Image: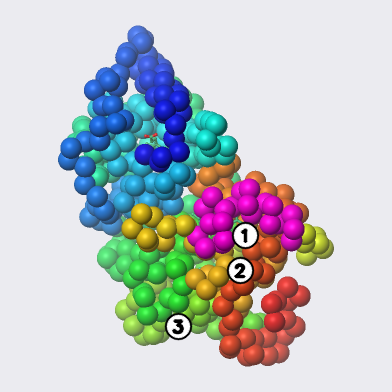
Amino acid sequence: MSDTISVGRMWKRWSALAAIIIIIGASKTGNAVAAPLKSSSPDQPSATEKKGVPKAMFTTRGGLAYAQFCTDCHRLDGEGVAKVFPPLAASPSVTNKDASAVLYFVLMGVATTETETSKGVLSMPGFARLRDDEIAEIVNFVRASWGNAKNPPVTAAQVKSARASLDPKVDVSAFDTPRIADVLKEPNAEQLVRGMRLNTETHTLLPKNVGNVLNCTSCHLNGGTVADGSPYVGVSAFFPSYAPRAGRVITLEDRINGCFLRSMNGKPLAKDGDDMKAMVAYFDWMKRNTKPEDRVEGRGVGKISQDIKPDSENGKRIYVAQCAICHGQNGEGIKNSQGQPVYPPLWGDQSFNIGAGMARTYTAAAFVKRNMPIGFHPGFPLAQGGLSDQESVDVAEYFSHMPRPDFPAKVNDWPKDKRPADSRY
Ligand code: HEC
Ligand code: HEC
Ligand code: HEC
């Protein structure tokens, strides 16, 4: 439990939880049922508590769905993020025999209460857009991991009845979110899971190619499955294609290596190696029936008017108020208690270099406008977004122009075409 959660806040959370369980229990049986909350005090984590990333994370539908939708905040090890997001390992609302509370959180989302010690109200989005069986799979994975009690599995029918009584808001945006869990149906499932992990754990799995602490998913959110978070849906249908920055036709492998060289400030991945093949297979899996001439809903990071003049001083104020909690007081990102990176830096020698798309004010502003901050608004699937166009440009100008690595090969960029006005060189 994060150390800023005061006793008062904890108590408020517990009273809310008890109320939820009573509401759902009552709607099921017609009577108010007091759930056995007392048996699992938050101060006494289960004696069987285990640490680390469960094996089932990458071999089961529930595990992969957790990896896609929940890890950004609750992390692969279920530990949450100190002072930001709560742990699910040994969380009483998860270990409780009665699944009403966890179903409530996943369907409806939840916001922390404001307290004396914590001014920001952090939110978890509702996941009612996921099907009943998908929610049951995630909840069962969470309830069986990290030493959480082995309770009877939740069924899709139970999710359906919780949904009927809670009547949650459902996200209706047109983007059809790929479900990473579906890779298990494919004959090359193992390769696809590897491809996914190379995107979500790039820094750990490819230390020779990554020169900073970023992962592909730092920008291609949730493993490339979020609209306007530069998703991978359909992308492999658009390559090979002409790239003005390179001044030639490039392949998907070239484009991936472009991000290795610039966004990851690293070295290219061998084009004929197994890792590149796994990455490309993962993109191909998300291609669906896209044709080269199609337009894919949610592709890229959106656009923002270049007529908006940046105010870097205001950007700095926004950074301190709305970004520093996750990206650090000095843009250095945040680490967990073992010193491993949790949230990525926005500047400094562990960030992307000046050759990256994110180093350009208006690309960064468009990304920030639609995707950051996470955890403060009701957006699906990351509670993301909320800044105005002007605020996005201001904060993007501020962090993109802070010191970061150079990109010596920049001299070869845009050999034939006009360089964009917000290019850094
Ligand atoms: C954008 C961040 C975010 C995402 C994504 C997210 N959560 Fe949460 N989660 C939160 C916040 C914030 C809370 C509330 C913390 C509080 O009340 O102090 C929370 C609370 C919970 C709780 C209650 C824990 C407790 O003991 O208070 C459960 C259970 C939970 N989340 C499960 C999930 C699952 C399962 C997923 C994926 C489907 C998920 N969350 C995705 C941010 C997130
Ligand atoms: C610092 C942020 C960042 C990181 C990290 C990053 N990318 Fe990108 N990537 C972008 C941006 C921004 C674009 C869009 C380019 C633009 O508009 O200038 C992009 C574009 C792409 C594209 C083309 C997408 C399309 O719609 O045409 C591919 C493919 C890609 N990235 C793959 C990767 C891979 C694989 C990794 C990890 C090795 C990675 N990226 C890491 C920011 C990033
Ligand atoms: C509650 C935590 C949180 C807050 C607050 C937050 N971010 Fe992020 N940010 C993230 C996460 C999480 C990612 C990347 C996803 C990942 O690593 O899985 C990210 C990624 C980014 C990236 C791309 C990766 C990189 O390091 O370059 C940028 C740029 C960014 N955030 C900017 C901002 C800005 C600007 C704000 C404030 C307006 C902000 N963020 C607020 C959590 C947060």
Magenta-colored stretch includes residue 205: no
> Under tag 2, what secondary structure?
helix
Residue at image position (40%, 69%) is: 202
Q: Position of residue 6 (x, y in %)?
A: 44, 31
- Name the residue type under label 1: Phe
Crowding near pointer 2: few (<14 within 10 Å), some, many (20+)? Answer: many
Marks 2 and 1: CB-CB under 8 Å?
Answer: yes
Disc ID at residue 358:
2
Disc ID at residue 267:
3
The residue singled out by tag 1 in the image is 367
Residue range (magenta): 312-333
Picture quarter with the C terminus: bottom right
Dot placed on the residue nearer the N-terminal end, 3 or 2: 3
Give the mark toward the camera: 3 or 1: 3
Dot placed on the residue nearer the N-terminal end, 2 or 1: 2
Disc 2 residue: CB within 8 Å of ligand 2: yes
How far apart in space, not on screen, are marks 2 and 1 (Cα)?
A: 8 Å
Magenta-colored stretch includes residue 323: yes
**Residue 316 sits above or below residue 375 on the image:** below
Q: Position of residue 28 (x, y in %)?
A: 35, 17
Dot placed on the residue nearer the N-terminal end, 3 or 1: 3
- 299 to the left or right of 179: right
- 247 to the left or right of 380: right
| Residue 339 figure quarter | bottom left
